[in-house]
């Protein structure tokens, strides 16, 4: 989709920026992410800004903070975060939009975790599960859940 083809609609869409620390290397994770990004383009303007891993949590925190969209709703993915169902996440997204916010930033720390200074900026600390998953799989799971939430809010059938 090109913004010049659809006029002002694109600019009024919710922007979701995913800020992961670490680069995906495995082709199957990359392909899965591409698929969900393609699906999400119908619902929102989606961006992934990969940040380099290493240098310690404080350095990674500074990089994450530099990529935040001013005034956005910030979600930090962390193990001590709240567990939400897909419907509850969809309700969070709807509430964010109802409050007039135009952007959501979703933060994924490195395999070492996320600095407390970044978590303190979050409007929501969210956990995917009590189970442990490979770090790079988390990005695919986050994209899938964002797609599911947008589909639920859009009245789609994906969630059924």
Image: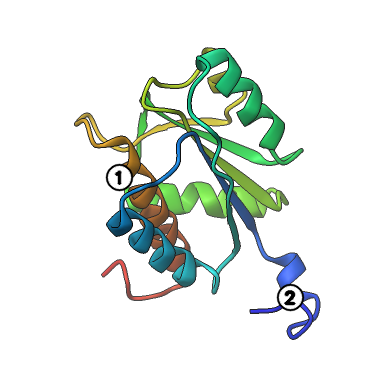
- State left or right for residue 11 relative to residue 90: right
- State left or right for residue 93 relative to residue 101: left
- Residue 120 lies, in percent from the top left, at 58, 18
Labels 1, 2: front one? 1
Mark 2 surroundings: few (<14), some (14-19) or many (≥20) residues within 10 A: few
Query: Which residue sits at x=41%, y=21%?
Result: 113
Q: Secondary structure at mark 2?
A: helix
Which residue is more in the foreground, 137 or 74?
137
Which residue is more in the foreground, 113 or 54?
54
Residue 30, picture quadrant: bottom left
For this orientation, the residue located farthest to the left is 131
- Residue 1 lies, in percent from the top left, at 63, 79
- State left or right for residue 103 relative to residue 112: right
Query: Which residue sits at x=50%, y=46%?
Result: 92
The residue under label 1 is: 137
The residue under label 2 is: 9
- Residue 31 lies, in percent from the top left, at 35, 63
Residue 117, picture quadrant: top right
Query: Which residue sits at x=68%, y=36%?
Result: 68
- Image vertical order of residue 33 relative to residue 64, above or below: below
């Amino acid at each position: 989709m090109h913004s010049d083809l659809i006029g002002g609609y694109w600019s009024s869409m919710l922007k979701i920026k995913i800020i992961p620390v670490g680069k995906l290397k495995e082709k199957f994770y990359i392909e899965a992410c591409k698929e969900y990004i393609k699906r999400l383009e119908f619902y929102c303007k989606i961006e992934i800004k990969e940040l380099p891993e290493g240098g310690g949590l404080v350095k990674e925190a500074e990089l994450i903070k530099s990529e935040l969209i001013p005034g956005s709703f910030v979600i930090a993915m962390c193990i001590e975060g709240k567990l939400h169902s897909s419907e509850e996440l969809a309700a969070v997204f709807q509430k964010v939009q109802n409050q007039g916010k135009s952007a959501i930033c979703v933060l994924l720390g490195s395999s070492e975790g996320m600095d407390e200074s970044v978590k303190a900026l979050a409007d929501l600390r969210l956990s995917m599960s009590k189970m442990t998953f490979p770090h790079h799989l988390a990005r695919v799971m986050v994209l899938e859940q964002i797609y599911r939430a947008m589909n639920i809010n859009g009245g789609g059938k994906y969630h059924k």
